[in-house]
Amino acid sequence: MTHSFSFNPALTALSTNKQIGVDIYNRFSVNGLNTMQTSFCYPNPLLSGGIHLASFGNDLYRENLFIIAVAKQVSEKVTLGISTNCRFLQSDLLETAPIRLAVDAGVVIKPVDKLLIGISLLDFPSVNLSVTDKQLEQTPVYNLRAGFNWEFVPLCLLTAELVSSAEKSVAVNMGVEYSPYTSFQLRAGLQGNPFMPACGIGYEFSKFTLQMAAQFHPLLGTSTGLGIQAHF
């Protein structure tokens, strides 16, 4: 289960501090095809909120994503969340920008200490807007995710997730995070369908967290990512 509320809106309410973050990720190892993301999370006992912006591509072709999420801890063990997202395509080849609106829903359960279980349903329902060319109209999709975070031994966190969508069969993602020091984390993971190993590090200093990661794709090679978060 990822810690990002862009995959489970219920995670917005589990943050202990307000956070703002920026990430840059080159998924295809091609210059000019970076994915840039920024997010803001505001936890509140009454109703927590979050905003997530992402952009992929260049001036000729660009995919954009905008998410607004809210979440509420309904009991000591259960947190619910819902979000709406807007995806739109910008290209010099198109007169209008195809837009998709969708709704995401998620739940996080904490049955015991140091164990979190998360389930989310993304992009369901969804609707296409501003599409005049039928070839550009995307088929409505869904994305079902279920996983857990478990600190099975002190300073070591195990994560696992099952992902099922309308576009591909079930995939399994797994990872482990080890913290030899309170401000430093070592990470390793495997993503299925296709099989992609990954590794990364995290370093906390003052009110900031710096994260770096690398992932190997069997066809595209190694891709890298860099992110920084501020807590206040």
Image (cartoon, helix red, strand yellow):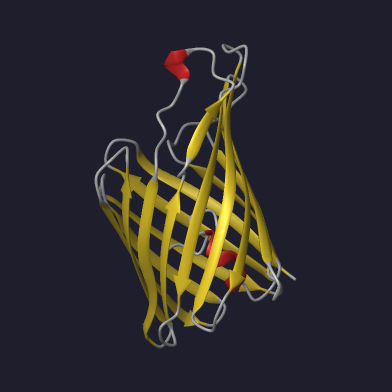
Q: At which x and y percent is residue 215?
A: 38, 50
Q: At which x and y percent is residue 158?
A: 35, 74
Q: Can the viewer see residue 55?
A: no
- Foreground: 203 or 153? 153
Q: Can the viewer see residue 152?
A: yes
Q: In this view, does 64 lie above or below 174?
A: above
Image point (67%, 66%), residue name: 48
In which quadrant will I find the N terminus?
bottom left
Most distant residue in the right direction: 232
| Quadrant of the rendered image containing residue 63 | top right
Relative to residue 207, is residue 192 drawn left or right?
left
Image point (58%, 73%), residue name: 14
Q: How many labels does the image show?
A: 0
Q: Is residue 64 above or below residue 5?
A: above
- Foreground: 150 or 208? 150
In which quadrant will I find the C terminus?
bottom right
Q: At which x and y percent is residue 177?
A: 41, 72
Q: In this view, does 21 lie above or below 147?
A: above
- Foreground: 210 or 150? 150
Relative to residue 136, is residue 39 drawn left or right?
right
Image point (44%, 40%), residue name: 27
| Quadrant of the rendered image containing residue 109 | bottom left
Relative to residue 83, is residue 162 drawn left or right?
left
Image point (65%, 62%), residue name: 229
Q: At which x and y percent is residue 227?
A: 59, 55
